[in-house]
Amino acid sequence: MKKHEKLLRKLSIPDRHRITTAVSLIHSNNYQMLDIKKLSGFETYRVRIGKFRIKFIKHETFNEIIDIIRRNDNTYS
């Protein structure tokens, strides 16, 4: 089982729905409703969804989800 799937199973239904909605928007290149920021020093981007962060890489034809993590003091270090 992938780490992302395990995290999603443990979340509340509203959090799970918000994250899965954001992931589908990322995959469809529909960024208007998302808080996206390019991470400095990396070729990755992040989306904030409450206390969760979705890190992904933009490719020419698709977007690759790297990680879905709960925000804490060590999130980006």
Image (cartoon, rainbow, N blue to C red):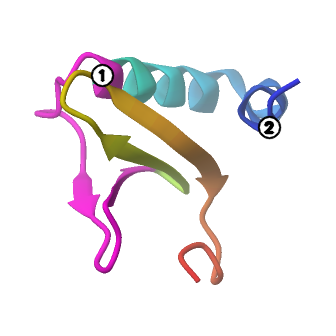
Q: Which residue is mark 1?
A: 25
Left or right: residue 33 compared with residue 4: left
Instruction: Give the answer, above or below, for where 25 lies relative to 77.
Output: above
Q: In the structure shown, which secondary structural element does the residue marked by tag 1 occupy?
A: helix
* Amino acid type of the residue tagged 2 in the rendering: Lys
* Amino acid type of the residue tagged 1 in the rendering: Leu
The mark closer to the camera, 2 or 1, is 2
Residue 37 image point, x, y percent: 24, 60
The residue drawn where x is 63% and y is 83% is: 73
Instruction: Give the answer, above or below, for where 20 lies relative to 76.
Output: above
The residue drawn where x is 35% and y is 70% is: 42
Q: Nearer the viewer, residue 61 or 22?
A: 61
Residue 49 image point, x, y percent: 44, 46
Instruction: Name the mark on residue 3.
Output: 2
The range drawn in magenta is 26-49
Left or right: residue 16 compared with residue 23: right
Instruction: Give the answer, above or below, for where 43 lies relative to 26.
Output: below
**The residue positioned farthest toward the front in the image shown:** 60
Queried whether the magenta region covers residue 54, the answer comes back as: no
User: What crowding class fits label 1: few (fewer than 14 Cα within 10 Å), some (14-19), or many (20 or more)?
Assistant: some
Counting residues from the N terminus, which is met first, the one under dot 2 or under dot 1?
2
Left or right: residue 76 compared with residue 69: left
Queried whether the magenta region covers residue 39, the answer comes back as: yes
Residue 47 image point, x, y percent: 36, 49
Quarter of the figure with the N terminus: top right
Instruction: Give the answer, above or below, for where 67 lies relative to 41.
Output: above
